[in-house]
Image (tube, rainbow, N blue to C red):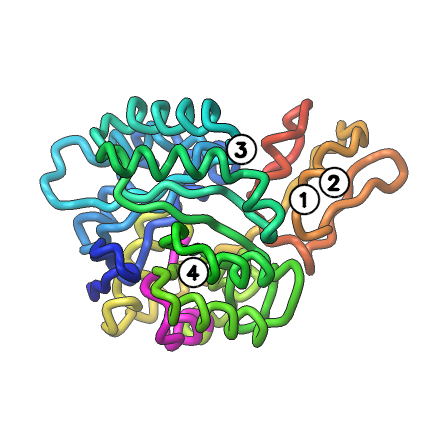
């Protein structure tokens, strides 16, 4: 496994970051022991970087995976808090549920522009205070928006950016692939640490994963890539690929057979909560129930978290 430093933070991370969203309730919904075993396999194969969020509800998986593990592990979490109190509660929850004395990286989740950053600045100021107290090592934000990356360039307190980028530009909310690449380049030049998300376009690019990963890994400004994994086979495949080793044909075949869909139960009553939550405009209400445009969907599963009837899930 290869390792690089995230911007000016001095935090060294593996090029492959374990994206914990996929093992949890919003997606695969694995039993905690099973999901923890998948994370543990990644750690044993050299991955030292885990991406999670309060919204994902995967802290118990990570805590279980770390039990008895002696290596250094970098954890990044995120939340939607916009007040000082809300951020304090989120950070304290993460520390308690992960059984950690500090969180390596804590972020504002899903920011869109300079305006949303401003609206969450009270919460971000608390993170800066927490950093002074040793509760956080670095702070930053995650985003699907070019405008947000551009805005973060001019804010010195933002140390790390977690943007969406893939070779097809799938999921970029407000611009093109080239515009996002230019924003990433400017952010890195300003000293920001960059680690990417959605290299596989939420699953749309699974038919050519090597091409998709090689594109993102070839971007010099990107330190690491968060990849969702929910099986040991996926861990083996990705760790081999990111280490520059040959992936056996049988393993390639096994991993590529996995496809993803957003499943909406027949009993959906069309309340529209999922439509409001979707950040990429993939959901709509037709004939009294939610329907998905799978060409636009990035299979994040965030819509399922707001469904009052629990009728949406990524499968």
Residue 82 is marked as: 3
Q: Earlier in the sequence, mark 2 or mark 3?
A: 3
Residue 278 is marked as: 1
Q: Earlier in the sequence, mark 4 or mark 3?
A: 3
Q: Which residue is mark 2?
A: 275
Give the residue furthest to the right.
287
Q: Are marks 1 and 4 in contact (CB under 8 Å)?
A: no
Residue 196 is marked as: 4
Mark 2 or mark 4: which is in front? 4
Q: Position of residue 58 (x, y in %)?
A: 39, 33
Please report the residue visible at 81 percent of the width from the left and 32 percent of the height from the top.
270
Q: Nearer the viewer, residue 312 or 58?
A: 58
Read off the magenta span.
212-227
Task: Answer few, some or many: residues within 10 Å of disc 1's Cα (few below 14, many 20 plus, some between 14 and 19).
Answer: some
Q: CA distance from mark 4 to mark 3?
A: 23 Å
Q: Are marks 2 and 1 in contact (CB under 8 Å)?
A: yes
Quick check: 229 above or below 188?
above
Q: Could you tell whether 187 is left or right of 295 in the image?
A: left
Q: Earlier in the sequence, mark 2 or mark 4?
A: 4
């Amino acid at each position: 496994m290869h390792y690089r430093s995230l911007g000016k933070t001095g935090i060294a991370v593996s090029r492959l970051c374990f994206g914990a969203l996929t093992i949890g309730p919003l997606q695969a919904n694995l039993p905690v022991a099973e999901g923890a075993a998948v994370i543990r396999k990644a750690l044993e194969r050299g991955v030292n970087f885990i991406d999670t969020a309060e919204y994902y509800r995967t802290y118990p998986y990570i805590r279980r995976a770390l039990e008895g593990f002696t290596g250094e592990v970098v954890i990044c979490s995120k939340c939607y808090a916009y007040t000082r109190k809300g951020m304090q509660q989120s950070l304290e929850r993460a520390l308690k549920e992960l059984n950690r004395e500090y969180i390596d990286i804590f972020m504002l989740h899903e920011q869109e522009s300079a305006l949303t950053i401003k609206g969450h600045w009270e919460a971000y100021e608390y993170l800066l205070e927490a950093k002074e107290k040793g509760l956080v090592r670095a702070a930053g934000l995650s985003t699907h928006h070019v405008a947000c990356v551009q805005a973060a360039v001019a804010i010195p307190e933002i140390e790390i950016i977690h943007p969406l980028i893939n070779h097809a530009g799938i999921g970029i909310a407000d611009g093109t692939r080239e515009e996002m690449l230019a924003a990433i380049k400017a952010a890195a030049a300003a000293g920001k640490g960059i680690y990417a998300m959605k290299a596989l376009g939420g699953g749309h690019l699974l038919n050519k994963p090597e091409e998709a990963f090689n594109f993102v890994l070839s971007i010099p400004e990107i330190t690491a890539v968060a990849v969702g994994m929910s099986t040991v086979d996926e861990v083996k495949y990705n760790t081999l690929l990111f280490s520059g080793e040959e992936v056996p044909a049988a393993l390639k075949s096994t991993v590529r057979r996995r496809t993803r869909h957003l499943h909406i139960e027949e009993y959906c009553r069309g309340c529209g909560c999922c439509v409001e939550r979707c950040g990429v405009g993939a959901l709509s209400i037709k004939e009294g129930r939610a329907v998905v445009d799978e060409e636009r969907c990035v299979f994040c599963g965030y819509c399922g978290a707001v469904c009052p009837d629990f009728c949406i899930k990524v499968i």
